[in-house]
């Protein structure tokens, strides 16, 4: 087309020049339309670019806010966890103290019960041997009591027999010491 374009311009043929003008006019219109389309596309891309940048700013702001919220929640969770750990440690200490006090109480209770039982048995054995005023009466009372409380009997009690024997031995030693004292 370049060769024919220059040739037509130089030769000056009217039909060729008209055709060239028409072609130039059409080409000018086509280029104008393309320029308009390109300008519209450029405007569209600029609008999209601005919308994208606005959206990115909003997303960045949301991200920053979410990170801050997550950090605050993490700090809050850490504080709650620290409080729970402290409470758990305090509870463990109180539980240990309670168990220690419970053991002490049970020990005191057991000792008190043993002392009370011993005192009751001593009172009982003392009353079982009440009125005995001679060594022979002591022996007879001892034999009778052992027959009654012997473990082989239906109502037998080993502990009671042991206490009766202890009391018998104590009273027997008193009678022996009294006899020696009078001799």
Image (cartoon, helix red, strand yellow):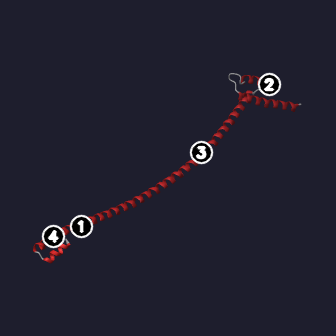
Q: Nearer the viewer, mark 4 or mark 3?
A: 4
Marked residue nearer the N-terminal end (2 or 3): 3
Q: Residue 91: horizontal and vertical position, in percent?
A: 55, 48
Marked residue nearer the N-terminal end (4 or 2): 4
Q: As drawn, which residue projects farthest toward the right?
A: 183
**Measuring 50% from the left and 53% from the top, which residue is drawn there?**
81
Marked residue nearer the N-terminal end (1 or 3): 1
Please state if 121 lies on the left or on the right of 33 as rendered. right
Q: Residue 162: horizontal and vertical position, in percent?
A: 74, 29
Marked residue nearer the N-terminal end (1 or 2): 1
**Measuring 63% from the left and 40% from the top, which residue is drawn there?**
106
Q: Which residue is mark 3?
A: 98
Mark 1–mark 3 Cα distance, whole angstroms, equals 86 Å
Q: Secondary structure at mark 4?
A: helix
Image quarter of residue 159: top right
Mark 1–mark 2 Cα distance, whole angstroms, equals 136 Å
Q: Nearer the viewer, mark 1 or mark 3?
A: 1
User: Which mark, residue 139?
Assistant: 2
Quadrant in which the C terminus is drawn: top right
Q: Nearer the viewer, mark 4 or mark 1?
A: 4
Image quarter of residue 126: top right
Mark 4–mark 2 Cα distance, whole angstroms, equals 156 Å
Please state if 12 lies on the left or on the right of 77 as rendered. left
Q: Which residue is mark 4?
A: 23
Q: Secondary structure at mark 1?
A: helix
Crowd class of label 2 (few under 14; some 14 to 19; many from 20; radius 10 Å): some
Q: Which of the pair 101/40 is nearer the observer?
A: 40
Is 45 situated above or below 140? below
Q: Residue 97: horizontal and vertical position, in percent?
A: 60, 47
Q: Which residue is mark 1?
A: 38
The answer to whether mark 4 and mark 1 are in CB contact below 8 A is: no
Q: Secondary structure at mark 2?
A: helix
């Amino acid at each position: 087309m370049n060769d024919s374009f220059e040739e037509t311009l130089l030769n000056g043929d009217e039909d060729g020049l008209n055709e060239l003008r028409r072609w130039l006019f059409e080409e000018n219109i086509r280029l104008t339309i393309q320029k308009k389309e390109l300008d519209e596309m450029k405007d569209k891309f600029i609008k999209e670019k601005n919308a994208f940048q606005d959206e990115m700013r909003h997303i960045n702001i949301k991200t920053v806010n979410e990170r801050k919220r997550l950090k605050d929640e993490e700090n809050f969770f850490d504080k709650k966890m620290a409080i729970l750990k402290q409470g758990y440690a305090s509870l463990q200490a109180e539980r240990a103290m309670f168990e220690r006090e419970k053991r002490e109480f049970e020990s005191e209770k057991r000792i008190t019960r043993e002392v009370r039982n011993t005192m009751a048995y001593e009172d009982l054995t003392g009353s079982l041997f009440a009125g005995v005023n001679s060594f022979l009466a002591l022996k007879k009372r001892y034999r009778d009591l052992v027959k009654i409380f012997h473990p082989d009997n239906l109502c037998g009690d080993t502990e009671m027999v042991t206490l009766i024997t202890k009391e018998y031995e104590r009273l027997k030693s008193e009678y022996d010491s009294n006899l020696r004292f009078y001799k």
